[in-house]
Image (cartoon, helix red, strand yellow):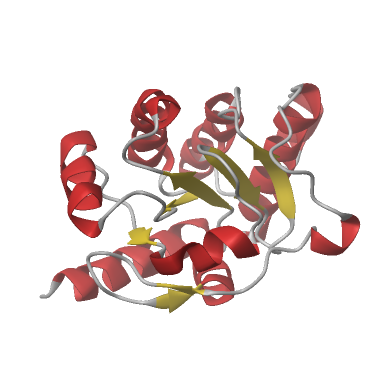
Amino acid sequence: MTPVDEDKAEIARIFTMIKNPYLIALINILIALIISYSKPVTAQSVSESERIGPDFLFTPEKGGDFYFNDRLQETQRPIFLYFWASWCPYCKKATPRVVALHQQFSGYIDVLAINVGINDSVEKMRAYMSEYNMTFPVMFDTDSEISSTFHVFGTPVFIIFSTDGEIMYRSHQYPEGIERALSVPVLQENTLEQSKGENVCCLIHSF
């Protein structure tokens, strides 16, 4: 089985695991709650007309191209989009947290990363990916076209999209509390395995 086939199989497995609409809604709500209580540093303000992220072709370094909106529909998970550069000192501090987020919560949030392609190279990106064990999809933004589309000026930039493609969070600052938000559906899924009749929505009231 090729790496691309393995990725497709993993996506199918995850989709089957979280296709329960209550869990999908819960993840969106909990992330929104955490973000609403935080005070993010705005990374180039987004107008109301730009609240839905633009569709684009994501070309991972390891292969298996996909369109952003297709990814949302296929996985039914929020997307954590990380814009970075290999020379960025703040990225070097943030990247381990992004890697840990993927390792712990890949079944509940889809981590994607884009090297902005400014004063950088594919070779440097590959070395950085290896150093930080970035196993999630990463692409090199040739000519910085996608970065420009998202009005990214300066790194890092973190953007979180709901399963409907709405921008829930955008900042130069890593979203504090996102792990706490995602821990609730993890616990709830374990509970559902033991008692499938339990309604996950009750967690919203106790959060």
Rendered residue at 41%/63% (across/down): 141
Give percent across and percent down for residue 171: 65, 36
| Residue at the extreme left of the image, as rendered | 1
Give the side of residue 6 with respect to residue 69, left or right.
left
Give percent across and percent down for residue 102: 38, 41
Q: Is residue 56 above or below residue 79?
A: below
| Residue at the extreme right of the image, as rendered | 48
Q: Is residue 100 above or below residue 126?
A: above
Q: Is residue 101 above or below residue 143?
A: above
Residue 99 visible: yes
Please identify the quarter of the rendering in which residue 20 is found.
bottom right
Rendered residue at 48%/47% (across/down): 83
Asked whether 196 or 124 is in front, the reply is 124
Rendered residue at 70%/36% (across/down): 30
Asked whether 53 or 21 is in front, the reply is 53
Give percent across and percent down for residue 198: 65, 43
Q: Tell me the quadrant of the picture where the C terminus can be found.
A: top right
Residue 19 visible: no
